[in-house]
Amino acid sequence: MPLARPTSPAIDGARLLQRIDALAAIGAIDGGGCARLALTDEDRQGRDLVVAWMRDLELEVRVDAIGNIFGMTPGWRTRAPILTGSHIDTVRTGGRYDGNYGVIAGLEMIEALRDAGITPARPLGVAVFTNEEGSRFQPDMMGSLVHAGGLDLAQAHAATDARGVSVGAELRRIGYLGPETPGFVTPHAFVELHIEQGPVLDAEGTPIGAVEDLQGISWQEVTVVGQSNHAGTTPMRLRRDAGYVAAATANFLHDLAHEMGGSQVCTVGRIELHPNYINVIPARAIFTADLRNTDEDLLRLSEARLSTFLDAISARTGTRVSSRTLARFEPVRFDANLVALIEDIAKGLGLPTRRMTSGAGHDAQMMARICPSAMIFVPSIAGISHNPAEHTEPQDLIAGANVLVQTILALTECRED
Ligand code: HGY
Ligand code: MN
Ligand code: MN
């Protein structure tokens, strides 16, 4: 794979990788991954480390009331900054690059510019958005959604985890309920560098993805109420088996994705049965449905098909089924000029590039609501992510950071205000 042509400023690859490793050590799990669920003590430690790096780089650190952290260069109050960044919270079985890479590459950009004595024509900022993953608190991309005005702060603070602990209480507990009003800074543009988390770039041997769009996301939590009964004595015809409804729905959604084809994906990631014993017919099942499609009409069709299926199986099994929306975002198109710029920059660095869609949700999709936004992807080996085995080759990590720096520099030289 071609190495990026040397440019100014030069990314210090060793420093970039060293920071990735240092952050990955917080909440480290077997297999080289991370468990830093949003607003846990591990998340706080990760935040504290990134804030320390920001201060070492003489960035002005601002924290807003949903816990988003912004490290800014001088002048950001009077001239809209160019922002980069991502998230450092992870899923419970996360990798070391998802989100973390984009934040650390942003810090590396700041340091490389400083080392080269380059002062961009516009202020810059590196953002760490709260609770991008949505694993502990829903919706996902919570911090950037509040920043973009898509979710009321009080509603976000009131979101609770499985133990009934709220976002607001956790932000206060870890010391990141900041003074700034969410949305206090509107960037001139936002560029997020992220691992692809899918198989495309690695399979093609393409080092850079210029992300054009991002698919729509529908998250539901479905509750099924049946009747616990004896697994041995209860004839099948008398059962009201909540566990069967959950399993049948997972099967239905798997088949629905194959039937619909295209970009449709369906995932039942969490199933909780009560009382969850071998010889008791489950009285209750709570499970999640994650539906995604690049086309909003088809995403709605998949939601309607699920609803129809649940109505029918509820009637057939004598169970009560209810569903609540945990997150719902339409597909997003990124700024065409920014995407073209990323493509040009990558090609100018001698890096093969391809345009692509993001299967995953990202903070950039929320920032696209308030300013021109786009994403740069680098390959994930075998497309593995949300898994400790998540891996991206060092030379790809460095190439992506070079594309980010040059893209941001190109944007700062644009004189229009
Ligand atoms: O679910 C997602 O796509 C993201 O990782 N929050
Ligand atoms: Mn991510
Ligand atoms: Mn993720």
Image (cartoon, rainbow, N blue to C red):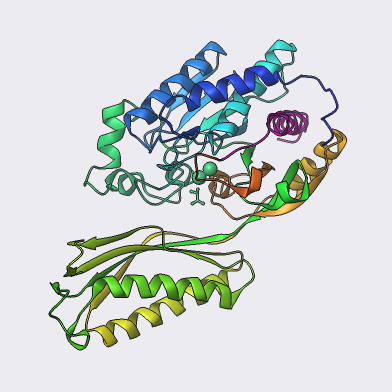
Judge from the rendering whether residue 223 lies leftward or rightward of residue 73; answer left or right. Answer: left
What secondary structure is the stretch in magenta mostly built from? helix
Is 412 drawn above or below residue 375 in the view shown? Answer: above
The picture quadrant where one finds residue 206 is: top right
| Residue 178 can be seen, yes or no | no
Q: Is residue 157 visible?
A: yes
Q: Quadrant of the C terminus?
A: top right
Give the percent coordinates (x, y) of residue 376. Answer: 69, 41
Query: Residue 217 colored magenta?
Result: no
Picture coordinates of residue 65, whole percent (x, y): 36, 34
Residue depicted at 15% across the width and 75% down the height: 227
Which quarter of the rendered picture does the N terminus lie within? top right
Q: Residue at x 28, y 87 (%)?
A: 316
At x 77%, y 50%, the residue is 204
Q: Quadrant of residue 40?
A: top left
Bounds of the magenta segment: 390-417
